[in-house]
Amino acid sequence: MRRRRRKQKTPEQMRRRANRRHRFFHMIGRLFFLGVLVAAAVLALTIFFKVETVKVEGATRYTAEEIIAGMDVKQGDNLYLWNKVKESDMLLEKFPYLQTVQMRRRLPDTVEITVTECSAAVAVPYSGGYLYVSAQGKALEQSANDGGLPVVVGATLNDVALGCGLTQENGDETEALLDILQNLDAAGMLEQLSFINLSDLTDIRIGYQDRFDIRLKSINNLSYYLRFAQTVIDERLSPSDIGRLYWDAQNRLHFIPDTADNVARSGMASASTNATEPAVTDTDTGSEDGAQEPSGTDGGASPSDGENPSDGADEISDEPNDG
């Protein structure tokens, strides 16, 4: 039997085969070199970059030592092998009065922590005492008393974790509370808040400056109505005016003079929601018809939410334009 003769390869075929072998070994060499670099980098991070110094800036309610002790990252840990977002979220929950936490790594061995703090805006009855809540709706602290804070009535809170924000799952009243706090804060009215009564979401009552009982029929267009009421108080009413501000069915704002005691009573859970009951009497205001005429207002308008004209309601403005 004859042996089949191997076909002789041409020089071009031999050159192509040599090039393929060269590229293969070149790729293997590059992968090996890359692996060596990665191993060297990991080794360097593990051996050389360790946490030696932790700095805390912006904290006043908590000490730097307390915040550092609350971290999972300890001295001697690797500077990079941990999650900054996870650590920040953990500090926000452990220390409720922290509003923001920002962490930075500084080579070769330093972690810088910058925090901002929040303060309690209102006290909400909770579990036989009170829960302090920030303007951002964060649960800050439980206390046996209200701490002199504006009290919120009508909102029921269940299973609230300190350091976490209130959620709408606690009911429509909580949703309304969060909306009111946000808008009061944005309008610069929060520091002069007296109370919030959410017992009836069609008759929301907001105490302001310990002198005014602002009535709202819903939280719709809340930002506009709060700014409008603030403008009227600052520019149309006098510093001695005390009473109720409310909008009628035609969306006109009215002011009814009243006493400071009655304004404060409106913030209580047992406050009457009977709109037909006269808000003031002749004795309350010392005027012939019970009306106190604010500067620059048109008196004599008849409110349409059940108030009696003899209650002394003064129309502040025509129907506002929501723009």
Image (cartoon, rainbow, N blue to C red):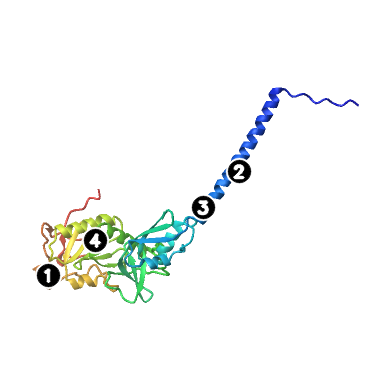
Q: Amino acid at mark 4?
A: Met
The mark found on residue 32 in the picture is 2
The Cα atoms of the two marked residues, 3 and 1, are separated by 80 Å
Residue 106 found in image quarter = bottom left
Give the SS element for disc 4. loop
Q: Position of residue 246 (x, y in %)?
A: 22, 61
Which numbered disc, 1 or 4, marks the residue closer to the eye? Answer: 4
Instruction: Identify the secondary structure beneath mark 1.
Output: helix
Amino acid type assigned to the residue bearing label 1 in the image? Thr
- The location of residue 150, given as percent across then percent down, is 27, 69
User: Which amino acid is tagged 3?
Assistant: Ala
Foreground mark, 3 or 1, reads 3
Q: Nearer the viewer, mark 4 or mark 2?
A: 2
* Direction left: furthest residue: 288
The disc placed on residue 16 is none
Q: Earlier in the sequence, mark 1 or mark 4?
A: 4
Q: What's the CA distance linking mark 3 and mark 4?
A: 54 Å
Q: Nearer the viewer, residue 298 or 249?
A: 298
Q: Nearer the viewer, mark 3 or mark 4?
A: 3
**Foreground: disc 1 or disc 2:** 2
Q: Is residue 199 above or below residue 101?
A: below
Residue that label 1 marks = 285
Residue at the far right in the pictured view: 1
Sooner in the amino-acid sequence: mark 4 or mark 2: 2
Disc 3 designates what residue? 44
Which residue type carries mark 2? Phe
Q: Which residue is rendered at x = 45% and y = 59% of the image?
A: 51
Rounded to the nearest angstrom, the CA distance separating label 3 from label 2 is 18 Å
Q: Can you identify the residue that label 4 sits on?
A: 189
